[in-house]
């Protein structure tokens, strides 16, 4: 049984259609990256999973249950949630805030100090929240989401306000939770650095799934160029002719070519046989490049009817 199963999900607010029908699943111990432009429907999906909204059409199952049903309260302790904009009572200390949530969630208070240490707030635990930076409040929000040791964790823009070191520590925690069997949905606009921590990516565009699968699966779908990066002493024009590709020059003496995935091995063989070769690496398309590809394609499909109408009006073509 999937931890989350969304089937033919549609969500309307009056005449406005936010989600337009798609299927999505999350398995135990799996990390799903949920990506999309502003207004794509990411937060709406989170609210459907939490039971804060009901779908207009389709079925939402969390732990095999309807999250909007009264009996789902029994399962809520297995679920942790970090919203994009955390808000706590400013006059309480970090420890008091966490203690308050611990009592609500029926968790032993001794967990609070351990969690404050885990998110790097031990020294700030006795300071009032009004003195916290955005990143510190975000880490406190993560601590409250982890109080019940959830088996499902929903994270909406969790690295907002975190510095690079804190972001790296956050993803280390995500890896640890995954290894312990926790299922995670990670919603983020910050794509660099995310791809090695997720099992699958779901890319939303205009309320629909534009892409869904592992990073390798998405790379195969797009067939975007692979970048081969190398260095050495070459006659550039001669090397370009051998590779049948333009050779680009970068800082620190680095050179590169962009090749179709089917041409990667043949290009590597040519480079490895060059007497002046000193270093050689390959760089597949990044998550950011994949995201741009699918979002651009989705917009082209949506814009096509309007472009066709414009052409017909301009030239008075009768359809």
Image (cartoon, helix red, strand yellow):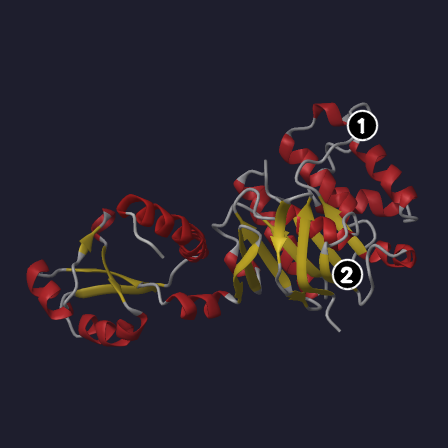
Marking on residue 89: 1
Residue for point 33% across, 54% down = 318
User: Toward which corner of the image does residue 90 lie, by quadrant?
Assistant: top right
Residue for point 39% across, 53% down = 304
* 298 over 115 or under it: above or below: below
Q: How many numbered circles does the render carry? A: 2
Judge left or right: residue 162 versus residue 235.
Answer: right
Q: Earlier in the sequence, mark 1 or mark 2?
A: 1
Could you tell me residue 188's position as x and y percent? 57, 47
Q: Quadrant of the C terminus?
A: bottom left
Residue for point 28% across, 68% down = 260
Could you tell me residue 299's position as x and y percent? 43, 51
Judge left or right: residue 154 versus residue 106.
Answer: left
Marking on residue 151: 2
Secondary element under disc 2, as helix, strand or loop, is: loop
Q: Nearer the viewer, residue 19 or 152?
A: 19
Residue for point 11% across, 61% down = 234
Could you tell me residue 34's position as x and y percent? 59, 54
Secondary element under disc 1, as helix, strand or loop, is: loop
Q: Nearer the viewer, residue 250 or 210?
A: 210
Marking on residue 319: none
Measured Cα–Cα span from mark 1 to mark 2: 27 Å
Judge left or right: residue 74 versus residue 51.
Answer: right
The local crowd at label 2, few if under 14, some if 14 to 19, many if 20 or more residues have their Cα within 10 Å, is: many
Residue extending farthest front: 318
The local crowd at label 1, few if under 14, some if 14 to 19, many if 20 or more residues have their Cα within 10 Å, is: few
Q: Quadrant of the N terminus?
A: bottom right
């Amino acid at each position: 049984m999937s931890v989350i199963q969304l089937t033919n999900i549609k969500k309307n607010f009056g005449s406005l259609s936010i989600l337009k029908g798609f299927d999505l699943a999350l398995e135990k111990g799996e990390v799903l990256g949920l990506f999309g432009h502003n207004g794509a429907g990411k937060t709406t999906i989170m609210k459907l999973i939490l039971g804060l909204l009901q779908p207009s059409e389709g079925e939402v199952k969390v732990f095999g249950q309807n999250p909007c049903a009264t009996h789902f309260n029994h399962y809520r302790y297995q679920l942790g949630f970090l919203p994009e904009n955390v808000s706590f009572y400013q006059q309480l200390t970090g420890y008091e805030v966490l203690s308050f949530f611990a009592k609500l969630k029926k968790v032993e208070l001794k967990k609070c100090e351990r969690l404050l240490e885990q998110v790097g707030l031990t020294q700030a635990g006795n300071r009032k929240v009004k003195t916290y930076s955005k990143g510190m409040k975000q880490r406190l929000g993560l601590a409250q989401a982890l109080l019940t040791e959830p088996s499902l964790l929903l994270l909406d823009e969790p690295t907002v306000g975190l510095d690079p070191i804190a972001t790296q520590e956050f993803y280390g925690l995500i890896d640890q939770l995954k290894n312990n069997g926790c299922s995670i949905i990670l919603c983020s606009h910050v794509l660099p650095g995310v791809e090695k921590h997720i099992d699958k990516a779901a890319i939303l565009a205009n309320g629909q799934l534009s892409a869904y699968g592992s990073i390798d699966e998405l790379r195969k779908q797009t067939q975007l160029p692979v970048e081969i990066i190398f260095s050495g002493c070459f006659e550039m024009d001669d090397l370009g002719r051998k590779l049948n590709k333009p050779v680009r020059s970068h800082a620190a003496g680095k050179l590169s070519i962009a090749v179709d995935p089917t041409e990667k091995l043949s290009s590597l063989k040519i480079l490895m046989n060059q007497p002046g070769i000193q270093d050689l690496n390959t760089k597949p398309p990044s998550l950011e490049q994949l995201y741009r590809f699918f979002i651009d394609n989705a917009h082209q499909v949506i814009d096509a009817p309007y472009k066709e109408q414009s052409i017909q009006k301009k030239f008075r073509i009768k359809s």
